[in-house]
Image: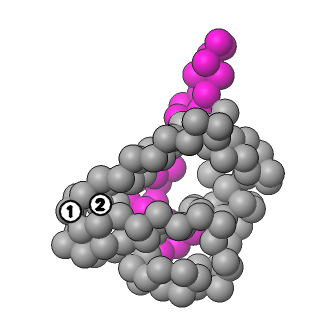
Amino acid sequence: MGTVTLTSQAAPIGAIISKITAANGTANANITGASGTLHVIQINNNANSSAMYFKMVDGTSATVGTTEPHFIFRVSASSTLTCVFPGGIAFTSGFTAYCVDGPGTAGTASPGSSVTVHFIST
């Protein structure tokens, strides 16, 4: 589990900026602590020489390797992936996230080096 930092922005923006430092194979449970809408995600895999998979679950917890992810983002080796969702992605009960070496539900090994993830949600 990486370290999660949340920064709330005042009106009129009303957004929450979240950051996971060192995302890994241990789930960061219920990151925002509530339901919401994800608008932007940026995943930095620059420190790794192989692709990694950042997985998100619409739920307050997840069992890595068992719980089926709702979203999987493949991030190529030594690169950063940024995704903007114009209509947003709604999470009904909050979201849980983790980063591993395998696609699909399987895969439990953490990245060899640090993966940093930034989110903007409301």
Q: CA distance from mark 1 to mark 2?
A: 6 Å
Kind of element beneath mark 1 = loop
Q: Quadrant of the C terminus?
A: top right
Task: Give residue 51's position: percent from left, percent from top.
Answer: 31, 73
Task: Give residue 58's position: percent from left, percent from top.
Answer: 72, 60
Q: Which residues fall within the magenta stretch? A: 1-27
Residue 6 in sight here = no
Mark 1 and mark 2 in contact? Answer it, CB < 8 Å.
yes
Closer to us: 28 or 14: 14
Mark 2 Cα-neighbour bin, 10 Å: few <14, some 14–19, many ≥20:
many
35 shown above or below 46: above
Q: Which of the 4 quarters of the picture holds residue 59?
A: bottom right
Give me the residue at 68% from left, 41% from top: 37
Tell me the amino acid under the disc marked 1: Ser
Closer to us: 4 or 85: 85
Task: Give residue 66's position: percent from left, percent from top.
Answer: 65, 85
Residue beneath disc 1: 78
Tell me the amino acid under the disc marked 2: Asn
Give me the residue at 65% from left, 12% from top: 12
52 shown above or below 22: below
User: Outermost residue toward the right?
Assistant: 92
Magenta-colored stretch includes residue 25: yes
Q: Which of the 4 quarters of the picture holds residue 23?
A: bottom left
Mark 1 Cα-neighbour bin, 10 Å: few <14, some 14–19, many ≥20:
some
Task: Give residue 73's position: percent from left, percent from top.
Answer: 47, 63
Residue beneath disc 2: 45
Give me the residue at 65% from left, 37% from top: 87
On residue 95, the disc is none
